[in-house]
Amino acid sequence: FNAAGKYRMPIGPDLYDGSAGIALFLAYIDRLRPDDLYRETAELALAHCRRQQDRTRIGGFYGLGGTLYLLVHLHALWRDDSLLDEAEAIVGEIEQRIGTDRTFDILFGAAGALPALLALEAVRPGAPLACARACGNHLLRHAVDRDGALSWPPREDDGAQDHLTGFAHGAAGIGWALIQLGEATGDPRYGEAGRQAFRYEMRHFDAQQGDWPDLRQTALSVAGVPRYANAWCNGAAGIGLSRIDCWDRLGRCDPVMLQEALTALSATIRNYHRLGNDSLCHGRAGNAELLLRTALMRDDPALQMEVKIQARSMWQEFEHSKAWLSGASGIDVSPGLMVGLSGIGMYLLRLGRPSSIPSPLLLDPPVVQAADDPVPSEKEELYVAA
């Protein structure tokens, strides 16, 4: 707390819990509820991100990939071509650093750079796709093949007992990114590698528990006892999102991928009540995104009702406590995207306008608002107001 009694905390430049993620949320709330304060604060957050930029990593949530992702979205919202010029310069920086990447994953590594590069390719074609191919080739070179199942060495910090499963650091996220690259390039090597990554993950599936164990060693780990992380980052929610998105991308005709998505959905719903915070990374908002996306893709009324029930529960808890629950350890209030208020806000915006608000959990590209989008209902406007 400062002398005025206000709580202050340092933040970095990244998309995960820094100024890039805050700028993303403020820019989207300004789109739906235009306000000079939102726009000005988003611009200040962008300026902070530029000043503090981490140029040592290329991931989607930490490093250059996350900044690239932000710039592509801000261009779509603000129509400022200089943002694309800035983004193109970052492509060159990413290309120079691919060879030194040894994290490989969505958060820190080459897999996380891929969605941002492909989003830029859609509006400034050429160099981004070439860089994306370089990222994909880097991932193929460093993949470990175990009888037709691909995985990648984890970071030393994870203290993992094996190569990781899950979206943020493991096979789900890297496989998903490679399948996306395969669709963008038409090169079957990437798509096949992505499927082989999913195959590795399924070898760790615990049929008795109906879930995937978290293979990291943490303070909560007990020797010889599997632990199951109910989360986007390292659990069923992220695994389910990887499968349902790829099922959609590949023409909705792969029954195995759909079944894996539904299995992950069942685990997510079954363990939803155990969640202790509202965050995107490992809280209610992130788990609920799997419910929301699957409900929309499959036009499932029962699942749509479940989404509304969970949203109502989140809101009732907020009304009772007058606080959203942060996913950051030891911090009551975080402004960041993946563990704090910005991410909770993005999910509420998605509930209100799912056709026009992207989810950062899958590093969705900007959505072009259709001229004939339906007028939001009163309920949808309530989510936006929240």
Image (cartoon, helix red, strand yellow):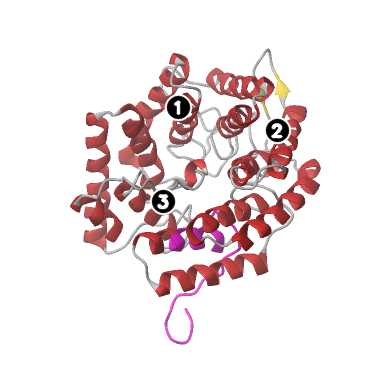
Amino acid on which disc 3 is placed: Ser
Residue 6 within the magenta-colored segment of the rendering: yes
- Per the rendered image, the range of residues in magenta is 1-27
- Could you tell me how many numbered marks the image carries? 3
In the rendering, at what x and y percent does residue 132 appear?
A: 69, 38
In the rendering, at what x and y percent does residue 349 appear?
A: 35, 53
Element carrying mark 2: helix
Label 3, label 1: how far apart the Cα atoms are:
25 Å
In the rendering, at what x and y percent does residue 322 appear?
A: 27, 64
Q: Identify the residue position indicated by label 1 in the image.
A: 248
Q: Quadrant of the C terminus?
A: bottom left
Label 2 neighbourhood size at 10 Å, few (<14), some (14-19), many (20+)? many
Residue 386 visible to the viewer: no
Element carrying mark 1: helix
- In the rendered view, does 117 fall on the left or right side of 27? right
Q: Identify the residue position indicated by label 3 in the image.
A: 279
Q: Identify the residue position indicated by label 2 in the image.
A: 136
Residue 176, quarter of the rendered image: top right
CB contact under 8 Å: marks 2 and 1? no
Label 3, label 2: how far apart the Cα atoms are:
30 Å
Residue 164, quarter of the rendered image: top right
Circle 3 or circle 1, nearest the eye:
1
The foreground one among 49 and 104 is: 49
Residue 215, quarter of the rendered image: top right
Single out the residue that lies furthest toward the left: 378
Above/below status of 289 relative to 211: below
Residue 189 within the magenta-colored segment of the rendering: no
Above/below status of 19 relative to 65: below
The foreground one among 41 and 102 is: 41
Which of the two labelled residues, at mark 2 and mark 1, occupies the earlier sequence position? 2
